[in-house]
Image (tube, rainbow, N blue to C red):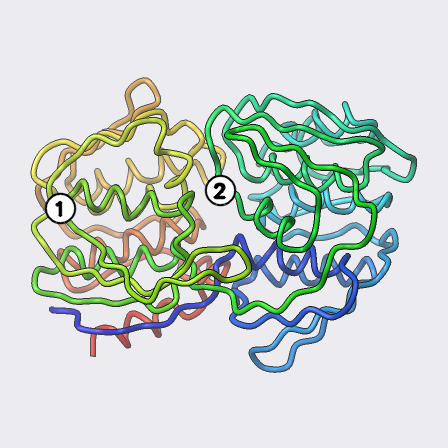
Amino acid sequence: MIINSIISLPGDKSISHRSIMLASIASGVSRITNLNDGEDLQSTIKAMQSCGALIKQDKDLIVVTGSSLASPKEPIDCGNSGTTSRLLTGLLSSQHLSFSLIGDESLSKRPMNRVIKPLKEMGCIIKSNDGLLPLHIDASNSFKGIDYKMPIASAQVKSAILLAGLGAKNPSVVRELKHSRNHSEIMLESMGANIVVDNNNITVNPLSSKLKSFNMDIPADPSSAAFFIALAALLKGSDLTVKNILLNPTRTGFIDVLGKMGVQGLVSNPMTNNGESCGDIQFIGSNIKSCDVPAHMIPSIIDEIPILAVIAAFAKGRTVFHQVEELRFKESDRLDAIIQNLQSFGINAFEEKNNLIVDGGKPKKMAKIISYDDHRIAMAFIILSLVAFKEFDIDNTDCIDISLPGFFDILEEIQR
């Protein structure tokens, strides 16, 4: 099998979530195209509509008319979306609302204390299920800004604080240990917020007027593209170009690691879209070599580690991903899910002191993929099985709809 294709993909999930949320509190009408079409985004749209946001969809066009939000009458169901739940804590607090958040079984196991703590320090009244959903937040009274040193690298936690800070009485400062994805900062600045980034310190000032509306064609999601790029990279002689893909430096860690593995991405047609860098990128299949992935790179590839571990399974030698403990707090315990699936295909993989270690070569036996109901685990190991055996067997494909409902259609398209 050889891939020779040019593809366009649905919009970036992170930017899609933020565009819907921030357009809902802006002044005027925002028009958004190429919104990510996964279930997680539907959770965000329904959440905002439950607070009175005016959001209409006409085929590929989403029209959001900024309005004053109101406290929802019922708990907001965030489904499986950690981004929806954590960012809403800040955004709805900035509007001084009282609201409850619930989620599915998987989301209800994911830690919320990381956003509860700073928001409580700001003055929000919060009740939780011992640091988990369901969560009730009362931000109806005024609250103060915060000077917060992040204990972990998390764009979701950082964004929750920055968004809450829009409605505080005084400025808020977030101090990052490691630079995480910065879509909230970029979008807030492009919409007229008073926000200052000084290396790893971000200061946001309370809004003195409403944010400006915008028009945006959301660039392709690099985390979704990674699966198809991996397929082409692992099939020598293949050639794949992804059109209009997000090239934000906090999101190109996957491309950087691929370079260390011997697969180079060639960028063309670079442009800037509402402050975000994007362009076309081409990959050609090559021999894969092992590499060492240092801890400072992990925040920029946290969503791509499952597929990078799959690529490492075909490399010559040992690949080490350092300090990947955050994988344990995703839709599944991804660290365990990666190791269990790699081992079932005959690849030696294990965890040692929070490092993921993969001894590459080639999968030795066909195995049934255990998805753990996690979309990224499912897609990553479908790619592994297709490359090694030209077929796959998996316990669940429904979970893929969370982020990329068209996954199998795109797979079919690029194999023609």
x, y percentage for residue 85?
66, 45
Identify the amino acid type marked 1: Gly
Q: Residue at x 77, y 63 (%)?
A: 49
Q: Nearer the viewer, residue 352 or 115?
A: 115
Would you name the residue on which mark 1 appears?
Answer: 262
Callout 1 crowding tier (Cα within 10 Å): few <14, some 14–19, many ≥20: some
Would you name the residue on which mark 2 appears?
Answer: 181
Asked if 326 appears above or below 398 in the picture, the reply is above
Q: Residue farthest to the right?
A: 141
Q: Does residue 311 appear to the left or right of 150 in the view shown?
A: left
Using the numbered discs, state the Cα–Cα distance from disc 2 to disc 1 in whole angstroms. 25 Å
Asked if 408 appears above or below 351 in the picture, the reply is below
- Regarding mark 2 in the picture, which secondary structure is present there? loop
Q: In terms of image quadrants, where is residue 292?
A: top left
Q: Residue farthest to the top?
A: 353
Q: Nearer the viewer, residue 165 or 51?
A: 165
Identify the amino acid type marked 2: Arg
x, y percentage for residue 145?
77, 29
Q: Nearer the viewer, residue 106 or 27?
A: 27
Q: Does residue 240 appear to the left or right of 243 in the view shown?
A: left
Q: Residue at x 49, y 42 (%)?
A: 181
Q: Nearer the viewer, residue 181 or 52?
A: 181
**Upstream in sequence: badge 2 or badge 1:** 2
Asked if 240 appears above or below 343 in the picture, the reply is below
